[in-house]
Amino acid sequence: MDSICNDISCHPTKYSIILYKTSWIYLFASLFGFYKKIYDLATYTSIVWLTCLNYWNNPKNKFNYYLDIIAVRSGILYHIIRAPDAENYLTFYKIFTIGLLFYIPSRYYFIKEKWLLSTIFHAGLHIITGSSLIYLYSNKIKSFYKSYLLSLIYKTYSTSFIKNIIRKFFFLLHIYKWII
């Protein structure tokens, strides 16, 4: 008999197996990303795939749960930030958002312990967001080194700013050596 976790999101085994299987879409998305030479996005998707598999293989483990949550949320954020470097980013945002919205009924039915409905919506989240990543990767995306994100960071932190930080670091290091 399955024991149901109250403090973390874990489904009974027969349902977590389904979510384990639908998590594999992220492998296909990441392999396609590597094929298209979008290494940063594909690497993030690979990390999400691995943490997802790790969690749904044993959904009663708190560490696996939090590791997956951190990877998924940071992966979502990173893809949202990097998407404007692609020609098809607006359509990607629409598809990706629809997939993410599937989490709401998934969580609602989870709380109500309606495992089948919760699983269907969560599986839908996997399938739609995974498909949206494949769609994003299918068009031309600027490399990370030419990305909007990196240019924004570079403009924000000018060379003189970085030189000041380096000077202060060495000054503090000198003081630290003097104290010891």
Image (cartoon, helix red, strand yellow):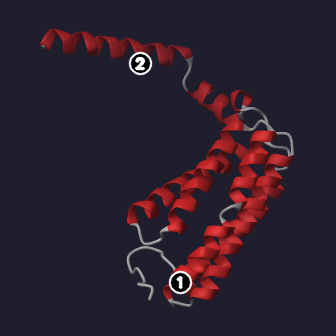
The N terminus - image quarter: bottom left
In this picture, residue 118 sits left or right of residue 7? right
Which residue is rendered at x = 25% and y = 9% of the image? 174
Taking 168 as reference, is 78 above or below it? below
Taking depth in this image into account, of 157 and 108 the one nearest to the observer is 108
Q: Amino acid at mark 1?
A: Phe
Name which quarter of the figure residue 40 lies in. top right
Check disc 1: other Cα within 10 Å, few if <14, some if 14-19, many if 20+.
Answer: many
Q: Which mark is residue 140?
A: none
Q: Amino acid at mark 2?
A: Ile
Q: Which residue is mark 2?
A: 165
The C terminus - image quarter: top left
Report x, y in % for residue 64.
Answer: 45, 61
Report x, y in % for residue 29.
Answer: 75, 53
Asked if one can make out residue 103 in the rendered structure from this viewpoint, the answer is no
Taking depth in this image into account, of 86 and 131 the one nearest to the observer is 131
Which residue is rendered at x = 62% and y = 72% of the image? 19
Report x, y in % for residue 167.
Answer: 38, 11
Say which label, 2 or 1, has the lower sequence index. 1
Which residue is most to the left? 180
Q: Which type of secondary structure does the marked residue at label 1 adopt? A: helix
Report x, y in % for residue 23.
Answer: 65, 64
Name which quarter of the figure residue 175 lies in. top left
Q: Which residue is mark 1?
A: 110
Taking depth in this image into account, of 36 and 14 the one nearest to the observer is 14
